[in-house]
Amino acid sequence: VGSDYNNPVNSTIAIKGGTFLKPLHRQDVSRPDAIQVSGGTFSEKLDNAWFADGFIPVENEDGTFGVATGSFAAEIAGVKYLTLQKAFDAATATDTIKLLSSVTDTPRLTLTNGKTVSIDLNGHDIGFVQNGRFQVNGGKLTLTGEGKVYEQAPDYGPILIMGSTEDIADYSVVDVGKDVTLEGWAPLFINNNAGCAYGVKVTMAGTVNSVRDTTGAAG
């Protein structure tokens, strides 16, 4: 299957079904959505950028790849990810993760060894599983955009910050934008590290909502 989808043609290849036994290849093109996949079975995994809105890739039991309805969780500079964790793991200090849909059952995401992550909630929410949270211990987390970050089973808080045992400036840094809501037993929980919390810096412009934990205790 081929098409000249560059200007002035601007055509689109729409794949809605069929079985493809050989890999699909696409030349580099600046125009997005030149290929839109919403169905079919493929011998190799496709680029996430090829899927039409509302469709995501799945791996079949026989090792082939198919298509299911669903939403990507996030993107970095146009590269889409099925889960927030995959985007979090791929992000560099200069990247911004943009949420594409609300996510739940998010595991613990740890920022340590200088890891810096910026997330634009983009009108969506992040729900953490029990004992899941952003854990900042020697890193920097920035949250912007409108949305809520919360514990599905309140325990500590959606953000837990640990300081250094040594007097180090800006060891663990958290910036929360004005349109962000944090919800949990203690929405911003600063934990001691062997009795110390050096280098903790928090800029909080958003909203905090404290709720009772799973035992009924108040934060």
Image (cartoon, grey):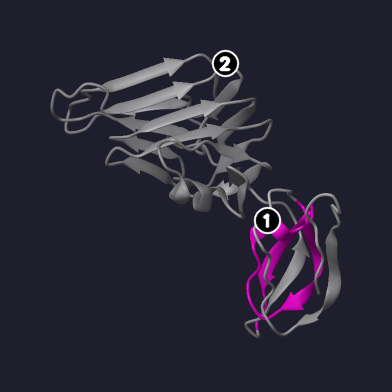
Which residue occupies 75% across, 68% down?
A: 67
Quickly name the residue at label 2: 178
Residue 111 in percent (x, y) is at: 36, 40
Residue 78 in percent (x, y) is at: 62, 45
Crowding around mark 1 (Cα neighbors within 10 Å: few <14, some 14 to 19, many 20+) is some
Quickly name the residue at label 1: 49
Does dot 2 land on a helix, a strand or a loop? loop
- Tell me if residue 152 can be seen: no
Mark nearer the viewer, 2 or 1: 1
What's the magenta region?
Answer: 33-61
Question: CB of mark 2 within 8 Å of CB of mark 1?
Answer: no
Which residue occupies 46% across, 40% down?
A: 133
From the viewer's perspective, tell me whether residue 114 is left or right of residue 75: left
Q: Earlier in the sequence, mark 2 or mark 1?
A: 1
Identity of the amino acid at label 1?
A: Ala
Identity of the amino acid at label 2?
A: Lys
Q: Please say whether residue 48 is one of the residues in the magenta stretch.
A: yes
Query: Which label sits on residue 153?
Result: none
Measured in 3D between alpha carbons, the distance from the residue under mark 2 to the one under mark 1, in whole angstroms, is 31 Å
Which residue occupies 86% across, 68% down?
A: 16
Which is more toward the observer, 122 or 185? 122
Q: Please say whether residue 47 is one of the residues in the magenta stretch.
A: yes
From the viewer's perspective, tell me whether residue 59 is left or right of residue 97: right
Crowding around mark 2 (Cα neighbors within 10 Å: few <14, some 14 to 19, many 20+) is some
Residue 208 in percent (x, y) is at: 53, 19
Residue 105 in percent (x, y) is at: 57, 50
Question: How many labels sit on residues?
Answer: 2
